[in-house]
Amino acid sequence: MVDRSPFVVVANRLPVDEVTTDTPGGRDTGSGRRWRRSPGGLVTALHPVLVERHGTWIGWAGSPGPAPEPFELDGINLRPVPLSEEDLERYYEGQSNATIWPLYHDNVEPPVFRRRWREAYRVVNRRYAEAAAEVAAQGATVWVQDYQLQLVPSMLRELRPDLKIGFFLHIPFPPIELFMQLPQRAEVLRGLLGADLVGFQQRLAAQNFIRLARHLLGTPYHGNVIEYEGRQVKADAFPISIDVGEMQRLADNPLVRERAIQIRAELGDPKTVILGVDRLDYTKGIEHRLKAFRELLGAGRLSVPEAVMVQVATPSRERVEHYQALRIKVEREVGRINGDFGRVGVPAVHYLHQSYSRSELAALYCAADVMMVTPLRDGMNLVAKEYVAARLEHGGALVLSEFAGAAGELRQAFLCNPHDLDAVKDALMRAVTVDEHEARRRMSVMQRHLRRHDVARWASDFLTELGAIP
């Protein structure tokens, strides 16, 4: 007999990491395998809701092959879904990250279309939908997350028409002319229309979705409500955020503050530390940022060692060809800058292709005078919000791309068009030279906004709206 839950979250990954026996915080779930809750805003926001409602989270456990038995951790029921090596290659690396990801990010890199990837995407989405149908109680609320699972809402509605189904897209949603390139376009659109509420990061994305439904399927709509197969499907914007309190507590920790001072000392105590923290992804604009820094050094507007850049590039999707090529380009640019402007023991760019703990990232945020977040396209970009939250009363400056969803909220950042190198350079120089009083004022306004709009508020707003839909 399966224990059924009144609240179910369906995501590509479970909110846990498998750990070794000597890893602090790891818990044995009775199967001989040890797990630890993974950090992240989504699980932080949904954890109290899942605990209160005896909820279940459905997702992949992180290792290819048979799935572990369902288990409970920190009050959350976890239902693993199996993914084989072939599933990972075709559904995840293929259709999700080589087709949908670049297409939804304005074709920054050309998407690749392959029929076997589309079939794998369909098969895996069906697997997730069947798992949700099995564990959801009668009339339960099911919240499906992100671009890997866009077919799940309609598949789940076929299996369980009694459910209240929400879907949230964490990445951008493209305009009609781009979406129409997708060979699976009608199937994906119908998949999303299986939900009662489809949430997006920005209002423009919700409008793109509504117009697309009209264009492709001829569905009538009024305002942000689509009439589809006798139901009403609402599309709206719910900008995601971070756990502001958690980041502020980290930044206020004496050990983190001490580490921030140590980082600046290790960098040679420069006048200005410029920081970038990104996944190594072609949407993040890392190359453009480096080129802007190089040109400022070449023009003498910045100089080493007074100004240094730290670029953290977290490894990402390393088996996907586009990402392999990007790493070569970024590392070549870093080498060029350091060759032209560095000195023995004093590089102009400190490039770190590795992952960091939350506390180390908080220390980097505290150490940085200027944060550069310059994606070519981004649904939101939570790094920008983390930097603002971590600054407490210490000022600092944020250079932010107009094409990040966060730009709609963090209006006191130094906004720029990342495709325009001169605009990036000007924004960076304004951030470097901003008056201390003005920097504190800008940061204070952004921090007030984040405190009012944290990740718990995001989850509450979405679930309240989903509950209000008849």
Image (cartoon, grey):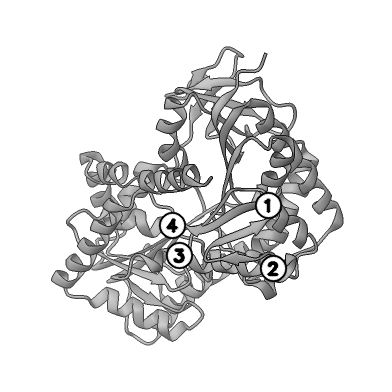
x and y percent of residue 102 in the render? Answer: 66, 64
Say what amino acid the circle numbered 3 marks: Gly
- Residue 331, image quadrant: bottom right
Q: Are marks 3 and 4 in contact (CB under 8 Å)?
A: yes
Q: Are marks 1 and 3 in contact (CB under 8 Å)?
A: no
Q: Are marks 2 and 4 in contact (CB under 8 Å)?
A: no
Which label's residue is closer to the chain start, 1 or 4? 1
- Residue 113, image quadrant: bottom right
The residue at which mark 1 appears reads as 230
Decide: few, some or many residues near mark 2? Use Cα within 10 Å; few <14, some 14-19, many ≥20: many
404 is higher (above) or lower (below) than 85: below
Q: CA distance from mark 1 to mark 4?
A: 29 Å
Report the residue at 31% width, 59% height from top.
267
Left or right of 171 in this view: 67 = right
Residue 268 visible within the image: yes
Say what amino acid the circle numbered 1 marks: Gly
The residue at which mark 4 appears reads as 239
Tag 2, which secondary structure? helix
Report the residue at 57% width, 12% height from top.
30
Say what amino acid the circle numbered 2 marks: Phe
The residue at which mark 3 appears reads as 405
The residue at which mark 2 appears reads as 179
